[in-house]
Amino acid sequence: MNLALTITPLADSWGMHDVGAGWWIVMMLLMFAFWGALIWGVVWLARGGHSPVTPGSQETPLQVLDRRLADGSISVEEYDERRKVLEKSS
């Protein structure tokens, strides 16, 4: 059985032969919007479902310095030097 012969009567009954190029463009744009939203949602969920920096929650330079000392990424000597520089610039 030919698939085109099966689908053609359905398309005729739904009036799909006379939709025109404008509807094809609209359907194509909606398809891209759907897939774009789906991909964006997957990426958003993979990143933890939230933005890493929210307004009003940015750390001050001194808080960043304290956090870096606490997690061991800088030594106490580096911390003291950088804290002095930060206090001078404030």
Image: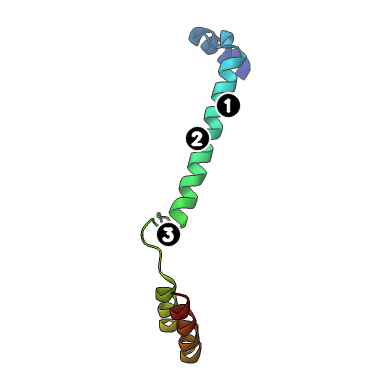
User: Residue at image x 46%, y 57%?
Assistant: 47
Tell me the number on the disc at residue 28: 1
Q: Position of residue 61 (x, y in %)?
A: 44, 72
Report which residue position mark 3 lands on.
53
**Amino acid marked by disc 1:** Met
Q: Nearer the viewer, residue 14 or 41?
A: 41
SS assignment at label 1: helix
What's the CA distance linking mark 1 and mark 2? 10 Å
Taking 65 as reference, is 6 above or below it? above
| Residue situated furthest left in the rendering | 56
Q: Which image quadrant: the N terminus?
A: top right
Q: Earlier in the sequence, mark 2 or mark 3?
A: 2
Tell me the number on the disc at residue 70: none
User: Residue at image x 51%, y 45%?
Assistant: 39
Q: Label 2: few (<14), some or many (≥20) within 10 Å?
A: few
Report which residue position mark 2 lands on.
34
Q: Confirm whether residue 22 shows in the render.
A: yes
**Amino acid marked by disc 3:** Val
| Residue situated furthest bottom in the rendering | 77
User: Given this view, does label 1 or label 3 mark the residue nearer the observer?
Assistant: 3
Q: Which image quadrant: the C terminus?
A: bottom left
What's the CA distance linking mark 1 and mark 3? 35 Å
Q: Position of residue 67 (x, y in %)?
A: 41, 77
SS assignment at label 2: helix
Q: Label 3: few (<14), some or many (≥20) within 10 Å?
A: few
**Amino acid marked by disc 2:** Phe
Q: Label 1: few (<14), some or many (≥20) within 10 Å?
A: few
